[in-house]
Image: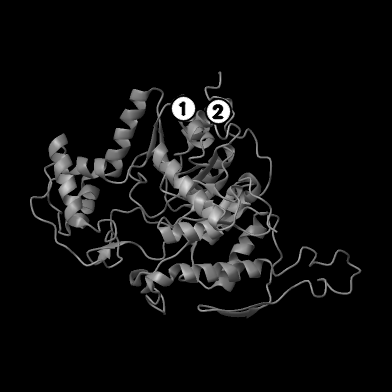
Amino acid sequence: MTRTDPTDVPRPDARLHFGVFFQGVNHWTIWSDPSSGSQIDPASFLRVARTAERGLFDAFFLGDGQRLRESEGGIHELDVAGRPDSITQLSALAAGTDRIGLVSTSNTTYNEPADLARRLSGLDLLSGGRAGWNMVTTHNAWTGENFRRGGFLDHADRYTRAEEFLSVARAVWNGWSEEAVAASADARSWSVPGAVGRVRSRGAHFDVDLAPTLPRSAQGHPVIFQAGDSGEGRDFGARNADVIFSAHGLDFDDALGFAEDLRRRLRAAGRPEGALRILPGTEIIIGATEKEAEEKARWVRLEQVTPAVALGIAGRLWNIDLSGRDADGPLPAEDPVIAEYTGKFGSSRFRDTLATVAEWRAKAEANGWSLREAVIELGPQRGHVGTPAGLAEKFARFVRYGAVDGFNVSPYLVPEGLDDIVDLLVPELQERGVYRTAYTGTTLREHLGLAPVE
């Protein structure tokens, strides 16, 4: 096949990176389909990771949830809910895979840096330098109820704590010099005297004095992922992250605008553009023809947004109990009940409730949508739909014009949801020269093409 990209594109030699996001708690994974497997059996995690590795993906990305989502005072029953501790799960996957990176989502609010840095360092060593850390913050009292401290962190402090947290973690990872272990059995001691440094840090959030217990890994230390989308979060990512996991990967102009904004912040932080990779989350739905792909996408949306899910989402918007209503009927006639923001499940998505409801009503009336169709059409859009060739052309444009560096793919089926991407889309990308044909390194940092850790 002849390449369709002109030679004057900004990044003609750019290569697309893929990660896979095993979501855990969500309603987007279609658990009820006969082809779906267990959402919590370790075999499901291993099946997805090995398929991604067969497809030369950069990373297997695991979310975290320190509390199940709740609704109306009880567990939200419409979620898939089976998220194990990420470092524990990824450690098991390290033994069952050879190359793919293993990214743990771990919270900086409800962990301590010395302990988490040691556990991540253990995963990095165990996997031969394939670990990544998706840094997330939280300030809400709801999650804090799980912990002795409760909701102790003000919203404004979450990134100051995260930045201090990362500084301590990096000091722990850098505590051993490269030559810390004695090179000969004839040496006077196992470690080279003075090669293990001491970490002393006293700041607003942490008071640490320790001797690190582990050496650096093959990639130095875990790759840092970050996902904050506020101005504060973008600045934090520009100063600290190796990879940004964004929500800006569906529309080309939106993705390019986000990337350009992030690169501006990166330069302001004194870092080169090559220091960062941008991997938006996405869903990919493939069909043999465009019509078949659209029909499959329609099926996926209806399976994801069941009548019960639609009523649950709309009920949180209107802040009234809609159970028993007809999801395939009209939107509620009642005005929404304005509730105080609590930080709990669903309360942050609809800050301007009256405006959102007015928009939903206007668009539903104009298009003849039922309540369920309005939820599908006006809820978060999930990703890309098309044929393997069409998607390959589209993704080549995204990466060669610098809108993204790749995608973190959320499969809608587990554990087989990556099969058509690996078997059908990856060869099309390879044929266009926009995707690797073999791993060229062994570490996650090498897969991503990031500079070595100093």
Report whether 119 appears left or right of 183: left
Q: Position of residue 309 (x, y in %)?
A: 24, 49
Residue 436: image location, x then y, percent: 61, 35
Mark 1 residue type: Pro
Q: Name which residue type carries label 2.
A: Pro
Task: For mark 2, give the secondary structure.
Answer: helix
Which quarter of the figure has residue 54?
A: top right
Relative to residue 331, is residue 268 drawn left or right?
A: right
**Dot 1, crowdedness within 10 Å: few (<14), some or many (≥20)?**
many
Badge 2 vs badge 1, beta-carbon distance below 8 Å: yes
* Residue 20 visible in rendering: yes
Q: Position of residue 19 (x, y in %)?
A: 52, 45
Which residue is at 46% across, 59% downward? Answer: 84
What's the distance in space between the residues labelled 2 and 1, CA to CA? 9 Å
| Residue 225 tag number | none
Which quadrant of the rendered structure holds the C terminus? bottom right
User: Any mark on residue 388, and which?
Assistant: 1
Residue 427 disc label: 2
Q: Position of residue 216 (x, y in %)?
A: 70, 62
